[in-house]
Image (cartoon, rainbow, N blue to C red):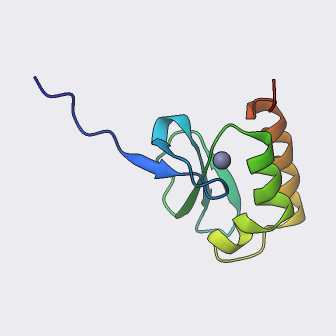
Amino acid sequence: MSRGHIPLRSCIVCNVKTDKRDLIRLVRTQSGRVEVDTTNRIPGRGAYLCHSQPCWDGALKKNRLDHKLKGLLSTEDRLVLQEFAQQVAAPSGE
Ligand SMILES: [Zn+2]
């Protein structure tokens, strides 16, 4: 009985490799916006982040996400992602 292949992806900040369903995919769409891809189906350049507040902070504050997605995030997109981060990211150190 085969358990199948589990696709692994790395968080762009901490580089932890894990089942991609445990990561959050961000994608730069063809319109240039950066969105959270909750369906894993939006076409475009993607980046993965884990559910960790420091990783989201690093991705947004240190412009790592901009680098990965080959372009600066707009202020509006950044705000949306920061709000999203507060909902999805588990508090660390607890
Ligand atoms: Zn991470």
Residue 73, relative to residue 78: is it above or below? below
Residue 11 left/right relative to 91: left
Q: Residue at x 48, y 41 (%)?
A: 18
In the rendered image, the residue lying farthest to the front is: 93
- The quarter of the image holding the C terminus is top right
Q: Nearer the viewer, residue 2 or 16?
A: 16
Residue 42, relative to residue 91: is it above or below? below
- Res 88 visible: yes
The percent coordinates of residue 13 (x first, y second) are 67, 57
- The quarter of the image holding the N terminus is top left
Q: Residue at x 46, y 48 (%)?
A: 41
Q: Nearer the viewer, residue 79 or 21?
A: 21
Q: Residue at x 77, y 74 (%)?
A: 72
Q: Residue at x 51, y 39 (%)?
A: 39
Residue 40, relative to residue 89: is it above or below? below
Residue 1 left/right relative to 18: left
Q: Quadrant of residue 38?
A: top right
Q: Quadrant of residue 34?
A: bottom right
The percent coordinates of residue 28 (x first, y second) are 62, 64
Marker count (numbered): 0
- Res 77 visible: no
The percent coordinates of residue 30 (x first, y second) are 58, 68
Residue 40 left/right relative to 63: left
Q: Nearer the viewer, residue 74 or 57?
A: 57
